[in-house]
Image (cartoon, grey):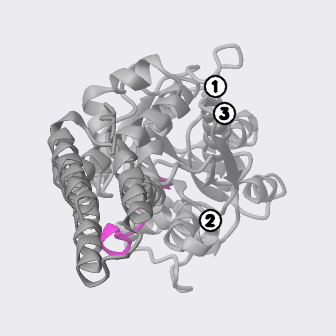
Amino acid sequence: MAMNFRFPQRLIEPPWLYVWLLLCVALIGLSIWFLVPTPPKKLVMTTGIERGLYYRFGEQLSKELAKEGIQLEVLSSAGSVENIERLSQPSSGVQIALLQGGVGQPSEHSQISALSAVFDEQVWVFYRRQAFKTPITKLTELQGQRVSVGPVGSGTRALSQQLLGLNGIDINKSDTGIIFKDLNAVDTLKALKTNQIDVAILISAPQAPIILEYLRAPELAVMSFDQADAYAIRLPFLKKVSVPRGVINLAEDIPKRDLTILATPTALVVSEEIHPALITPLMRSAESAITQLGLLQKEGEFPSALGFAWPHNEDAKHYLKTGPSFLHRHLPFWSVVWIDRAIRIGLPLLAILLPLFNYLPVLIRLRVEARTSALYKRLRQLEDKLQKDKAYNWRQELDQIYEQASKLRVPKKYAVNVYELRMYIEMVAKNLGQI
């Protein structure tokens, strides 16, 4: 009986093994894919009133982020207090905000972290010239006047309360000798011009459109703080700022005299919901937005890791120390995202699959042995049948065994197994032929 066997060079033919490996890879890959989600392409930021600097900064930041392929929705608000409330509520959908220095307690809002201080806001005390006989220089001179301290939920109101509180004036009490109004900056300007109030405390940078309207109003004057150094000591987040005559607008001579005022840093903050991959484009875009705002700030002063009490976001801290990564400097943001995801997914996959590949030779050996053992078993069964029934038609069954053996595909390493099987089949055929 001629029996010619072939010994293919490729691995054994176990489709189940390849299918099993592919399923494992697919399952692990999908698991990690969902565990390492892509950053959202849309963010929401809460700022301040629409004619204020916060809103203007948000619009500029939105333009810069659009260059990175990220959409930023800018919301107006009453100010920093409302911004904290929105940022603390996941249902609000807000991930980014601007917060005035000295507003909010970080210990009560652990889900908020700061990226950096982005600019200073100045403390302005505007008053109607006709309401005072001489220029005022101290907050204690507001006795008997009608004073706007900002709307509830604004950083202006929060800081006004602190400043006046240092002078023994509680804005929440009615027996202070001062009538307090909760007006926003726009309504406050109207009220000043129509003699409905006498004084307004505002917190904003001079380039904010609404502040320029105040500074241009001929019936209004700005208080210069004689006690600026004392305030900066009592409230460390404040600093003394000199505003030279004409620095805001030389042509219009604004302001018309040198001023000493206070300033507080504004922090760009994020909620814990923010995707870490978005920190770099946010920081880079903030840097570009800041350059559009500077007037009383020094070159390179912002963004800064100083001037805020909120915990510093670790990714932002690293960015301020080292700048953008090599990939971020040379590739578009979304290309970096996909490369980063590939690394985050690929490394765990390798860590899981490499040990499995160590077991692959064992699996192949076991599979080869299992298939050859099955044929050996059939041969023994055939011999047993002939022992019981000498007339049994053994040739047909032996041909089937031979055909199955000839289809075995094994690597060279296991060719000897098939060779031994062939020898055994030939021996069985020879023995049976003698019966």
Write the residue at 25% across / 62% down.
432
Label 1 is placed on what type of residue?
A: Ile
**Which stretch did the figure color magenta?**
99-110
413 lies left or right of 192: left
Q: Residues within 10 Å of mark 2 (few under 14, many from 20)?
A: some
Tell which circle, 3 or 2, labels the residue nearer the N-terminal end. Answer: 3
Q: Which residue is mark 3?
A: 66
- Circle 3: element type: helix
Cα–Cα span, label 2 and label 1: 40 Å
> Looking at this view, is 129 or 146 the one in front?
146
Q: Which residue is mark 1?
A: 254
Q: Quadrant of the N terminus?
A: top left
**Residue that sits furthest to the right in the current view:** 194
Cα–Cα span, label 3 and label 2: 19 Å
Q: Residues within 10 Å of mark 3 (few under 14, many from 20)?
A: some
Q: Quadrant of the C terminus?
A: bottom left
Q: Position of residue 379 (x, y in %)?
A: 26, 66
State whether residue 24 is above or below residue 422.
Answer: below
Q: Is residue 318 magenta?
A: no
State whether residue 334 is above or below residue 424.
Answer: above
Q: Which residue is mark 2?
A: 93
- Circle 1: element type: loop
Tell which circle, 2 or 1, labels the residue nearer the N-terminal end. Answer: 2
Cα–Cα span, label 3 and label 1: 35 Å
Q: Is residue 105 magenta?
A: yes
Tell which circle, 3 or 1, labels the residue nearer the N-terminal end. Answer: 3
> Looking at this view, is 1 or 146 the one in front?
1
Q: Position of residue 244 (x, y in %)?
A: 48, 23
42 lies left or right of 356: right
Label 2 is placed on what type of residue?
A: Gly
